[in-house]
Amino acid sequence: MKLLEIKDVNKSYKLAGKEKIAVLRGVNLSFDSGEFVSILGESGSGKSTLMNIIGGMDSDYEGEVIVQGKSLRSMKEKEIDAYRKNKIGFIFQSFNLIPHLTVLENVTIAMQMMDKSEKERNRRALEILEEVGLKGHVKKRPNQLSGGQKQRVAIARALANDPDIILADEPTGALDQETSEQILELLDSIAQKGVLIITVTHSQRVADFGSRIVRVEDGSIREDQALKERYHSEKKSVDKKGKSLSFLASFKLAIRNMQLKAKRNMLVALGASIGISSVLLMLSLGNGVTGYINDQINSSTNPLLIDVVKSAGGNVKAQGGPPAERLVGDPFTEEDVAKISGIKDVKSVEKATTIREKSNIVYGSKNYALPALQTVTDSVTESNIEAGTLPSGNEVLLSTGFAQRLTNEQSYGTLVGKSVKLFVNEMNSSNQPVIVEQELTVSGIYKQADRGPVGGADAYVAYSTLEEAYKQHKISLSPLQLNAYAANVNDVEHIKTDIENAGFVTSPTTKLMKQLTTYINLASWVLAAIAGISLLVSGIMILIVLYVSVVERTREIGILRAIGARKKDIQRIFFSESALIGLLSGGIAIAGALLVSFVLNMILDRAFGVELIQLTPSYMLFGLGISTLISVMAGLLPSSKAAKLDPMESLRYE
Ligand code: ADP
Ligand code: MG
């Protein structure tokens, strides 16, 4: 079986109109391993066209190309790519090295799409480079080499995947005579190992060097002349497993290329980052404002607290003044308390009551009416205590205003620890007036907030203290208000609903707060969305830059395709590049947002004592993600354009 057979190949190019020009006319040739064939013909006679057809770069022809018994026409695109990669080594007149890669990398790149470890690839590449006489030049870049050296690199690259056929299109066309001879010697030594070498030349002198000359004229074979015996050594056919260009390799290539255009890429990333940065700042501002408002509300109201009052026949009326719309209803029974305690997710229930306009405090010789006496609940917090502590058994906490009245505004703090007497005018069960009397120690002074949860109360005692005092006078104290506590803020809403369904009334404070934060969140997302319009601009910018990059690298794409890169591999390189730009701009955006929020927070802190921009790690992650996403999406079109480029046309691209 012949290694390569060309049967009745006809090829014509379509010109602008419908005119066709025939370039190859009925070409029939067959080749064996170990041959060194020179295809000799004048410029324009169709030599390169023939090489491209043999190399699987061009499938638009009539006739058959049969390699080791298998027709190229029967192969799928993937198989053709594998064929180019494994069976064919291309060598061009203009070397076609990738300028931004080193000599070593130019050789290993062909092996990146093979199933070999990096170490093994480097070892093999060094071995081949030594073979072609470039041992000391592996770290150089193509533009640091002479023409002959460049062609040796190209030969090394062609040999990298151990091909059966080497196609060299005018390999010495750009070299002087002496260098040409060295290159031809090198090719001859490769043929000696059993590789089929097909070179194209228009020089008789070069053609004479090989073992056979095929003369082409006007697309037809004029003469097929054997000069000497072919080399008979059998080339060992190694089983080669191909794979796609790994993501790591494509990222490395992309990074290389981005470094090459570092300034441009930085500018694009910077531009794109502005949009991301503003989105992040808007979200962080919303977050900060919401947090601030929540804090403000929570510092005066316990968010877990649900006020409950009992309504008997619409008897409930709202009493003005702080806290907003505190309701006063009927006394709760023990049964009611048990019912509310039993509601799902209620952690505890606290009894509370307010005694209005029927109590007095006597301190020494002074007797003052207490407009409002309240029982202490969890919402009376340490933080508002001016002096002393919260009241426990038989103690009373006085408001600053009331304490000032008792001491004639002077050093009311000295009241702490003093003894006072409390009187409450009550009715017993048989409607007889009773005066409840109890001696209490002042536990502390409570700073009255303008709008506190305990509103205008003047004195606070523990519910148990009041209950005990009532008991001693044979009256039972029933709470007018119950404070139900949820274990979790998220449970508050459903507990309120359950309590109301059980026939009680709850205050609307928490709901309002929730609505307010919802609106702020909404507003910050709307602002972020407006800032997001600039993301569109970023996307378009990245799109344009990648298009330019594709155009700039058309030739490189052609080279990669010629050495066996699949469409997918090319797509991956540009995909990596767009992802990298996205990551870069995301990173810059985060840094920018951090800086701006730091400076703004400092100014806000000075002016108002609050840091309103709360940039969280999750926002940063979101920024990085969205930036990468936009960039990758912008990269879709250019990278698929790159993948679709015709390999032959790309190589011809100047
Ligand atoms: P050679 O390599 O022998 O110099 P080519 O195979 O490159 O010749 O070209 C053979 C003929 O085909 C030339 O006349 C050339 O102008 C024409 N030709 C080559 N490529 C194209 C193309 N893509 N479109 C139209 N004509 C082409
Ligand atoms: Mg040519």
Image (cartoon, rainbow, N blue to C red):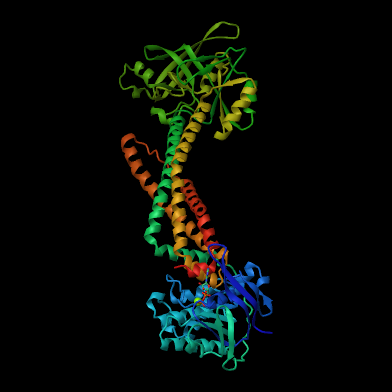
Provide residue 231's location: percent of width, then percent of height.
Answer: 59, 91
* Figure check: 466 above or below 17: above
Q: Residue at x 60, y 16 (%)?
A: 311
Provide residue 128's location: percent of width, then percent of height.
Answer: 50, 83
Q: Image quadrant of residue 165?
A: bottom right
Query: Is 343 left, or right, of 508 in this rendering?
Result: right
Quadrant showing the N terminus: bottom right
Provide residue 352's location: percent of width, then percent of height.
Answer: 53, 21
Residue in front for this viewpoint, 96 or 602:
96
Residue in front for this viewpoint, 520 or 629:
629
Residue in front for this viewpoint, 517 or 52:
52
Quadrant showing the C terminus: bottom left
Task: Evaluate whether residue 451 shows in this view.
Answer: yes
Query: Is 614 left, or right, of 347 in this rendering?
Result: left
* Figure check: 164 above or below 537: below
Task: Evaluate whether residue 388 shows in this view.
Answer: no
Provide residue 627's location: percent of width, then percent of height.
Answer: 47, 50
Q: Residue at x 39, y 52 (%)?
A: 270
Residue furthest to the bottom in view is 228
* Figure check: 405 above or below 299: above
Q: Residue at x 52, y 61 (%)?
A: 642
* Figure check: 540 above or below 287: below
